[in-house]
Image (tube, rainbow, N blue to C red):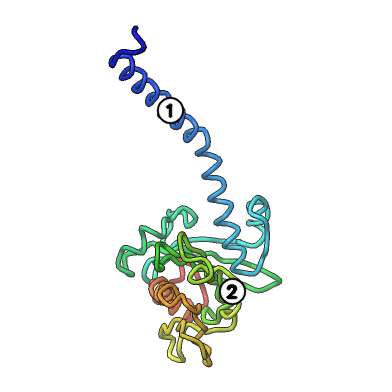
Amino acid sequence: MDQNSNGYTYFFAVAMVLVVAASLSFIATTLKPMQDTNVEQEKMQNILSSIKIDVKREDAAEIYGDYITESFVVSASERVDGVDAFSVDMLKEVRKPNTERNSPLYIAQKEGKTYYIIPLQGTGLWGPIWGYISLEEDMNTVYGAVFDHKAETPGLGAEINTAVFTDQFPGKKILDDNGELLGIDVRKGGSTTAYEVDGISGGTITSDGVELMIADCLEAYIPFLKEYLNTGTTSSADL
């Protein structure tokens, strides 16, 4: 074929597109299992971090079972059997009404105490934000919290994943004296009560997103938490 002809140029371009597309598809398919493993390890790392267990991502799976003793799904006031809590897609669940969500709950044992870990999913200034918040045995006092984001501004909204922000959460309360949800107010400085933390300076919209995310996600657990506080059990057979 004449290499100077239009036909040759067209044929060469199509061939290159097919070769590149096939190569990218092969690489993506080959790396998919590794990517899935990394996502699972990072999720375990974040769950452990919410109860103040610092571990490298690649080591998370090895010690995950040492602390996370049980996980199940909550819907309204009931424990849902037959649904794998770890596989629940929170991004999809938070689009449903609170009463229709499958909300994962992780139970951890650490130094003789029980902690309840709740996943969070919300929206920041530039995209999704997420995290985990752990509660002490009273299911009211925050033990720890971790947050992360997809595309928040470095030095501003992105600061939600720093210790300066997350270290304010331990000891805060989510329920009032009547057991009703108050959530945690992420305010512009000057936090003084057990229901408040200081927001990120210059990151007001992302700070508001964290506040809304906590309130929205916790709301789905309130009926179950009330049952637990009344009965003292998380067993579906006793609820």
- Which of the 4 image quadrants contains residue 128? bottom left
- Dividing the image into 4 quarters, which one contains the N terminus? top left
Secondary element at image label 1: helix
Report the residue that reaches farthest toward the top: 1
Residue 179 drawn above or below residue 73: below
Q: For this view, does 155 lie left or right of residue 221?
A: right
Query: Where in the figure is residue 20, as x and y percent of width and height?
Result: 43, 28
Report the residue that reaches farthest toward the front: 4
Residue 20's mark? 1
Could you tell me how many numbered marks the image carries? Answer: 2
Residue 174 drawn above or below residue 107: below
Residue 183 drawn above or below residue 220: below
Residue 144's mark? 2
Q: Residues within 10 Å of mark 1 (few under 14, many from 20)?
A: few
Is residue 224 in sight in this rendering? no
Q: For this view, does 189 lie left or right of residue 223?
A: right
Tag 2: residue type?
Gly
